Amino acid sequence: MRRCLKCSAKSVVYLPQHRLALCKEHYLEWYLKRVEDTIKEFRMFDRTNRVLVAVSGGKDSLSLWDALLSLGYKMDGLYINLGIGHYSELSRKVCEEFAKSKKAVLHTVELEKDMASIPSLKEMEKRPVCSLCGQIKRYYLNRYARELGYEVIATGHNLDDETATLFSNTLSWQLEYLKRQYPVLSEGNGFVRKVKPLFKMSEKENALYAFLRGINFVEEECPFAEGASSVEYKRLLSQIEEKSPGTKLRFYTEFIRRVHPILKQEGGVPIGACSVCGEPTTSDVCSVCRLKARLSLGSSSSSPSS
Amino acid sequence: MKVRVLYRGQTKELEFEKDRVSAGEILRALHLSKEYAFVVKDDEVLDDKDHIKDGEEVRVINAISGG
Ligand SMILES: [Zn+2]
Ligand SMILES: [Zn+2]
């Protein structure tokens, strides 16, 4: 039986990459300190900033919201209802209940009202639905944060998300994507500052935090994420991690320490404002507005009166 | 022996050809690794080597998510 490094009680968590065994109380303490240290190390925000956290109902975003509230930050939530049947209904309920239990503010965006649900958008798009969905979420997150006057957007991206993305972008040397892979993206050009305070925490660490804090989170997977390449990469990387603990953390932190500064020197693509909605884009009309234009074309051409 | 497993909102029944299994064996039966998943019994997180007896109920949390 392993014992807690801090108090010698029976440990409930063992973290091989840190060679650390901890009891419940000291795990939660360790987790909060690690999140706080990450926020400070990367100067993500302070207690005077208004921060909007993107919540999906999953373990990562709810752990993030819970941790930041526990640490005394000013944090409201934004839930984007993607309209994915039972999965979205359940997610919304879980987010609403969490917000209520913490007496926190939760804003909700109804994708179906503003344009169309993800299942109907999937029908008209050729590219993988997860990349479409990701783009739409980023769009609404930035737009609502701006409209509601938040200075910072926080997302629950974890170490496994970041290393799977880094691995994928490295396999095809996507330099433009690699350039934007960093725990803090500064504000400017119409973008609100974006931060990932959990980027050093693995998925399991977040799930353990959520479980030990008694947070009710959605365990079900989005039905469209089935067979997503990111899950494959995560499984592959976990096999390497099992053989040599600490690999994921090293892969990502050494990328941001040694490679990212070199990539950053090269200037990025010029960014302007979308002529329709005003959100930042590299073209005249942003991709979400182009999608909306196709939606209205599609519905008018299919209506019998036209 | 049989173990009832609550996994991602569904209950499964796993059968083993012995009278007790470890938490690690439950994970392997579900093709999961301790790198990203863990077993909970009576609200306690189990260690890999902790045992589960016939007829007991556990919850398995798989932390990997896609998207
Ligand atoms: Zn302890
Ligand atoms: Zn636009």
Image: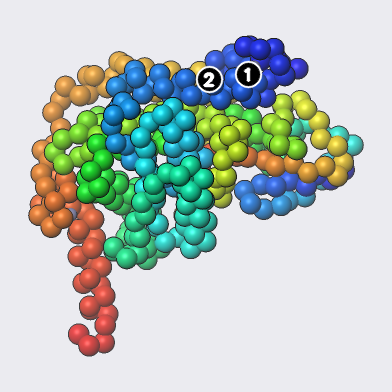
Q: Is residue A38 above or below residue A81?
A: above
Which residue has dot 2 on it?
Answer: A30
> From mark 1 to mark 2, how far is it between C-alphas?
9 Å
Q: Position of residue A178 (x, y in %)?
A: 28, 30
* Within-10-Å neighbours for mark 2: few <14, some 14–19, many 20+: few
Going by the numbered disc 1, the residue's amino acid type is: Leu
Q: Are marks 1 and 2 in contact (CB under 8 Å)?
A: yes
Q: Amino acid at mark 2?
A: Trp
Can you see residue A160? no
Q: Are marks 1 and 2 on the same chain?
A: yes
Q: Quadrant of the C terminus of chain B?
A: top left
Quickly name the residue at label 1.
A22
Which quarter of the rendered image does ligand 1 occupy?
A: top right
Question: Split into 4 quadrants, where in the image is the N terminus of chain B?
Answer: top right
Q: Is residue A77 left or right of residue B44?
A: left
Q: Report the coloring of the rendering.
A: rainbow
The residue located at (37%, 38%) in the rendering is: A75
Report whether the residue tagged 1 is closer than 8 Å to ligand 1.
yes
Residue at image coords 16%, 45%:
A280
Chain on which label 2 sits = A
Give the answer, above or below, for where A12 lies relative to A192.
above
**Which of A302 and A192 lies nearest the eye of the viewer?**
A192
> Farthest residue in the right direction?
B19
